[in-house]
Amino acid sequence: MCGIAGYFSTKPLSDNTADIVNGQLETIKHRGPDAFNQYLNRERGLALGHSRLTINDFEHGAQPLHAVDKRYVLTVNGEFYDFKRHRATLMAEGDRFLTKSDSEIAIGLYRKFGLDFTEHLRGEFAFALYDQQEDELILVRDRFGVRPLFYHVSDSKDLVVWGSEAKAVIAHPEVEARLDPKAALHQLMQTIAPGMSAFQGVHSLSPGHFLRIRKRDGRLDITQHRYWDYEFPHEEERPKEFDEQEHVERIRAELIDAIVLRLEADVPVGCYLSGGIDSCCILGLASGAMQSPVKAYTISFDDDNYDEAPIAREMAESMNADQHVINLKAADLYGQNYIDTVWHCERTFYNTLGVAKNLMSKTVWDSGYRCVVTGEGADELFAGYPALKRDMFLHGLSHEPADVRAQYQAALEKTNKLFKGAILAENQRHHADWDVLCGFTPSWIQPWMDTLDLARPLLADDVAHELRDYDPIGEIASRLDKDMLDGRHPLDIAQYTWSKCQLEGQILNWGGDRVDMANSMESRPPFLDHKLAAAAVDVPPSLRIKGNIEKHVLREAVKGVLPEVLYKREKFAFMAPPAHTDEAKKAKVGELISSFLTEDSVKDAGICSPERVTQFLNDYRADNDPTSLVRKDTLLNHLLTLHILHHHFIK
């Protein structure tokens, strides 16, 4: 795991290029504190930078990596799995390698397959590969977007700048650091549009895509290509009859394979462990694969309604794991830890879970570990979220009697009452663009439509005027591929749209890579292995959610390693206790408000109206309705983090 940065220009590099690249790398040194290196080709206008976190090949794995014949130069952030098999095959065919690093197989596979080499890459990665002979650069991102990659193209199309984090892009002197008003509105409502960053002119490369960059007539010809997508079968293609056990066994086999591959490293590998099925089954299967006690890290909150540590403890004891529990209170979740987490995430967040995970990754590093396997992606593959269940009950069970569907729906609302206003809307919402795109408005976006109703009136008058015709909900819909939705089951549609928006923009950002790498700690999510995903999309919707049981096929695949209480437990959203839940948190969030949401601070940022933000804060303090408070807590976090972004990167 590392960080990459650099730029490619139609003009020769300037004399201060080394300093520029070092400046880019300095902003992401937390991603790779072990070494800074760069490759400069002044005549070709190419600058490649790399900050290294040593996981494999301690002695020879420093980057940039070069082909034996010097034709290719490579910088990689992430891991390629199954690389030993690829190395052996390529060497048998006459290729040669200069290191034992997993990263170097990208060069050999590209030499053999050209742009089709992406089909053979397995893992979590973002990388830059330059072909000296063709004077051509490609930027590639993994299939689900586990590893981030941002880029900027100059107005004159003669310069492209990239980096593992947006801060490395805006560190380039020709990229202006300016918050994007449209992105600000998206962040206030929670859901950013695919490809969007917080900054004007800085884009996130889409998962499963690569940029091909060539020089044409004094300009850069930049084309984006999709090499993979999370594609569900058309309903008419699904078999009418199926063997449940075959699906269970296939999922089990692919998951075990994905976990075993991610346990391979030249450093010890631990596990994140919550009280959910996802991380618990990973611990159980990893314990079997490693044949020795696994180091497990668990977050414990000071609120029984949100704390999953007791179940995680039962799981750890059943697997004889070496468990480390991190106990977090209000003072940990707010204050400087909150402010620092915003800097790392470069976007707003609605809950302090990201702060908690930042502190957990620090604990991992301090304990001597650099790498863990994690449970992200299971809910996306096997329909674990409450909003996905709601869509199944509302739109995917037309064959069930109305009273049965109503019974399922009532049970769902009852067990998720705690999260009403954040992850479930209390009333059904519709949006014309989404109804056309999907045939319905997915439940996962509806609570953020409610939040948008609160957020838009808080904009400063000039920003509100600029965005008067801008519809953020419609914008999100416009960036999704309708061909991936037409003819699919409603549950498939809900899972696909969630994964394209919330997975990359939230779960793998402030819930994943950004807070893990804040402390130079590599996380590896086996569920986001593309071979496992290929098996998951073939699972019939009725086996993903069977009756009222979400993730049914996964439960059956791993029930042998789960305690009974966990095997039978309904999905519980992993969230930190919101600020309104106790006086200590109210006091700590009040300190942040006093620093970042004063009328002068809000005016200085220029995005929101100082007077209307003050009125919102007064209304928040006076509110006693639990659902309303959950929603206002999310907006309060977005307001705070948006203004902290301004403080970090603009002011």
Image (cartoon, helix red, strand yellow):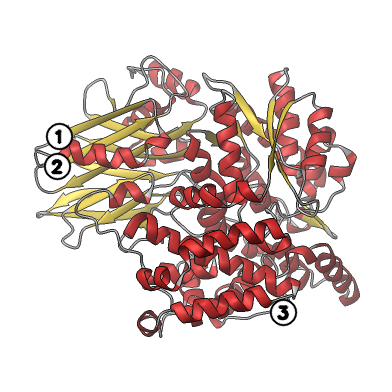
The answer to whether any part of residue 233 appears in the image is: no
Q: Check disc 2 and give the amino acid type.
A: Gly
> What SS does tag 3 mark?
loop
The answer to whether any part of residue 2 appears in the image is: yes
Report crowding for label 3: few under 14, some 14 to 19, many 20 or more residues within 10 A (C-alpha).
Answer: few
Image point 83% across, 36% down: which residue? 562
Q: Position of residue 361 (x, y in %)?
A: 57, 36
Q: Position of residue 163 (x, y in %)?
A: 33, 45
Image point 44% across, 77% down: which residue? 610
Q: Is 644 displayed left or right of 628 in the figure?
A: left
Q: Position of residue 188 (x, y in %)?
A: 51, 69
Q: Nearer the viewer, residue 630 or 377?
A: 630
Q: Nearer the viewer, residue 193 or 537?
A: 193
> What SS does tag 1 mark?
strand
The residue carrying mark 2 is: 45
Q: Is 586 displayed left or right of 344 in the figure?
A: right
Image point 43% across, 47% down: which residue? 148
**Is residue 287 placed above or below 401 in the rendered structure?**
above
**Is residue 64 placed above or below 344 in the rendered structure?**
above
Mark seen at residue 41: 1
State the separation of the CA atoms marked 3 and 1: 58 Å
